Amino acid sequence: MPAEQTPAAEPAGHQAKAIPKKWLPEALLLVRDNPEWSDNKIAGKVDVWASTLSRSPEYQRGATLARGKKEDLPKGHRTTDGAIEAYGPD
């Protein structure tokens, strides 16, 4: 009977590091200013792969807002004490 295999352990002190998304602000500005551009075109302008954009939840949220209709945006405001007042559909 073969011995059970255990997964290789990570080296001591090794942790996954978050890679800064230096391209994200520029990509969001481009999609805001040019909502008709494809993600592929925006990726080329910020020098990343299109799949990088499609895997970024921050980019996806920003692009959805930039490309959406104004009527689709949530309605409401923030009060001076920081509370959020939201309005539902009539």
Image: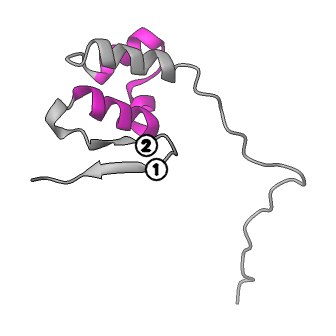
**Mark 2 and 1 residues: CB-CB less than 8 Å, in contact?**
yes
What predominant SS class does the magenta segment belong to?
Answer: helix
Q: Is residue 48 magenta?
A: yes
> Residue 71 location, x and y as percent?
14, 36
**Residue positioned most to the top:** 45
Visible in this render: residue 90?
Answer: yes
Name the disc covering residue 79, or none. Answer: 2
**Residue positioned most to the bottom:** 1
Query: Does residue 7 appear to the left or right of 28 in the view shown?
Result: right
SS state under label 1? loop
> Residue 86 location, x and y as percent?
30, 50
| Amino acid at circle 1 | Ala
> Residue 22 location, x and y as percent?
59, 20
Name the disc covering residue 30, or none. Answer: none
Query: Does residue 61 appear to the left or right of 81 in the view shown?
Result: left
Residue 84 against residue 45 in the figure, above or below: below
SS state under label 2? loop
Visible in this render: residue 56?
Answer: no
The residue positioned 43% from the left and 43% from the top of the image is 79
The residue positioned 86% from the left and 53% from the top of the image is 11
Residue 9 against residue 86 in the figure, above or below: below
**Residue interval drawn in magenta:** 39-67
Name the disc covering residue 83, or none. Answer: 1
